[in-house]
Image: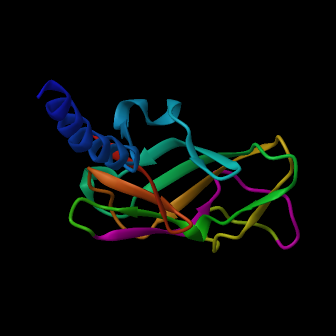
């Protein structure tokens, strides 16, 4: 009788353990900049997440640090990064943001948004980029990259 109960308990527990392994990692907003999010050879860290502008209006911003952990060059596509709000509204990367002027020809104005472009990252290197989002971020929110659910951001 004991072995039957033990077998039944294990039969019920194993599917629960397997299902729990498919859950995305939950990251608190306060510890967001400390927790890496891994997608294949790319290790991403959200250095800063501004959910909206002053007084809760406007679009959000995200600052992402991406590291290539593979021995070959990899490409980071910011357009493949998406955040899904608590109300299932998807917020996408809209434009690259720069905080200073560059002396280039033609001259560059950081107030003018620039479409995000793919970035090739050499082996072992990392980049840090800031992007404008297409809307506000409302928590809890799910983070997707390349059609995969990677994490859930909670308060």
- Residue 55 position (above or below residue 134): above
| In magenta stretch: residue 96 | yes
**Looking at the image, which residue sits at the far left?**
1
| In magenta stretch: residue 85 | no
**Residue stretch in magenta:** 89-106
Give how far across and how far down residue 72 sits, in percent: 87, 53
From the viewer's side, name the closer residue of 122 and 2. Answer: 2
- Residue 150 position (above or below residue 93): above
Can the viewer see residue 111?
no
Q: Residue at x 26, y 50 (%)?
A: 140
Q: Residue at x 32, y 54 (%)?
A: 141
Give how far across and how far down residue 12 sits, in percent: 21, 43
Q: Residue at x 40, y 50 (%)?
A: 22
- Residue 114 position (above or below residue 15): below
Give how far across and how far down residue 147 sits, in percent: 51, 69
From the viewer's perspective, is 34 left or right of 12? right
From the viewer's perspective, is 2 left or right of 17? left
Q: Residue at x 50, y 34 (%)?
A: 35
Q: Quadrant of the C terminus?
A: top left
- Residue 39 position (above or below residue 94): above
From the viewer's side, name the closer residue of 60 and 110. Answer: 60
């Amino acid at each position: 009788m004991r072995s039957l109960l033990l077998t039944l308990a294990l039969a019920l527990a194993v599917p629960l353990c397997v299902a729990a392994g498919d859950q995305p990692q939950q990251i608190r907003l306060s510890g967001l900049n400390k927790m890496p999010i891994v997608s294949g050879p790319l290790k991403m860290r959200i250095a800063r997440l501004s959910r909206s502008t002053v007084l809760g209006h406007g679009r959000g911003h995200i600052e992402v640090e991406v590291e290539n952990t593979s021995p070959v060059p990899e490409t980071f596509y910011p357009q493949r990064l998406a955040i899904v709000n608590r109300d299932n509204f998807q917020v996408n990367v809209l434009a690259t943001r720069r905080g200073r002027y560059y002396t280039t020809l033609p001259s560059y104005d950081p107030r003018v948004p620039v479409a995000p472009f793919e970035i090739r990252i050499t082996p072992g290197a990392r980049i840090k980029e800031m992007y404008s989002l297409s809307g506000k971020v409302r928590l809890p929110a799910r983070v997707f990259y390349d059609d995969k659910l990677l994490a859930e951001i909670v308060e």
